Structure formats: structure tokens, C-alpha cells
Image (cartoon, grey):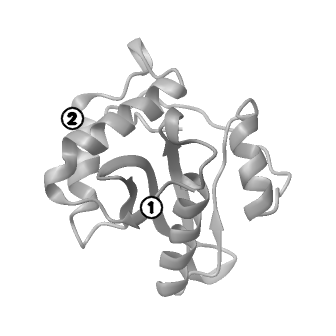
Amino acid sequence: MCAALTVRPPKRNEFAAWARLWEGYNAFYDRAGATAIPDAVTRATWARFHDPAEPVHALVAEADGRLVGLAHHLFHLNTAMLAPVCYMQDLFTDADARGQGVGRALVEAVYDQAREAGSPRVYWHTHETNAQAMRLYDSLAGHTGFVVYRRDLGLTGSLEAA
């Protein structure tokens, strides 16, 4: 594990450090050109993390005074449960910090926040080619067998992070 790893919400003055990780995450999933996340969406997402009225949350992992990972999650209602469930939308670790427990610590911190919020479930998805992440995920959760289908409707503001 990274020396002195701390997982916590990002501070308002850490936009640049968080944005570096966010850019790394988007590059990992080849979000460039027409599929690039617009700056306005990035800035709105950052603002949501700091707005207590928003259901979107962020955690960062810090090691040796540097942010080395991020996790974004949100709570939403579900037709099969009374309490909101937690969807972990994004998880990313800097390439030089992978394999050192950062991803595991971030997922466990999301689990803790979900428990604290009374959420009975945390779920997420990843791309089938992300073998390294799937090895971690297989040790932290069960694979449900569900396949994700999506159709973008081309509406303004509908650009979403996969």
C-alpha cells in the first residue's frame, strides 16, 4: 500500500490536482475529440461535489502530499428497494500508484459512505477490457452478469461519463 495513504473528500482548493486525475481517467477511456468531456461539465461536476444539496460525491486518495486516486459516487432511488442505492460512477488511480492498494482503499471508503447513508447496495461497471481493475473488483464484489445497454439521445447536456 502507498505510504501514509489517506482517503477523504477533496478540498475546494484542490481543483487542479483533482482535474489532473480526472483528465487521466478520461484519457484511459479514450474520451477525446468528439467524446471529450467539455470543460463546463468538468467544472459543474467539481461544483456538485461541494454542494450539499447534490447527490454526487467525490473521494480522493492522497499519498505523500499528492492526490493519487479518485472515486465519484452518487445515491439514487431504486424500484427494488426502499433506501437509495449507491452507484460508483468513476474510479481512477494514477498509473504509478496502481497495485499499491489505492483502488481498494477508495472502494472501501465508498462502501463506508454508503453504509453511513443507509444504502443497502453499492454497484458499478467497468469496460470488459479493463482486466487489471476487474481483478480488484472480483475481490471486492460479485459480478452480477448484467450487460449495460446505452443509447445517447444527442440532447444538449447529455454528455455523460461512461
Q: Position of residue 16 (x, y in %)?
A: 21, 39
State the residue in front, 116 or 154.
116
Q: Is residue 93 above or below residue 141?
A: above
Q: Examine the image and state in which quarter residue 154 appears.
A: top left
The mark nearer the N terminus, 1 or 2, is 1
Q: Position of residue 57 (x, y in %)?
A: 37, 63
149 sits left or right of 39 in the view: right
Q: Residue at x 58, y 41 (%)?
A: 98
**Residue 96 visible in image:** yes
- Outermost top residue: 33
Q: Amino acid at mark 1?
A: Leu
Secondary element under disc 2, as helix, strand or loop, is helix
Q: Is residue 47 above or below residue 115?
A: above
Q: Amino acid at mark 2?
A: Ala
Q: Is residue 78 above or below residue 124?
A: below
Q: CA distance from mark 1 to mark 2?
A: 31 Å
Label disc, if present, on residue 40 of the rendered structure = 2
Q: Residue at x 57, y 56 (%)?
A: 1
Give the number of marks.
Answer: 2
Q: Which residue is mark 1?
A: 5
Secondary element under disc 1, as helix, strand or loop, is loop
**Residue 148 visible in image:** no
Q: Is residue 161 above or below residue 29?
A: below
On-image quarter of the C terminus: top right
Q: Residue at x 66, y 42 (%)?
A: 126
Assess disc 1: are there few (<14), some (14-19) or many (≥20) residues with their C-alpha within 10 Å of its C-alpha.
some
53 sits left or right of 121 in the view: left
Q: Examine the image and state in which quarter residue 131 appears.
A: top right
Q: Residue at x 46, y 34 (%)?
A: 25
Q: Position of residue 130 (x, y in %)?
A: 70, 34
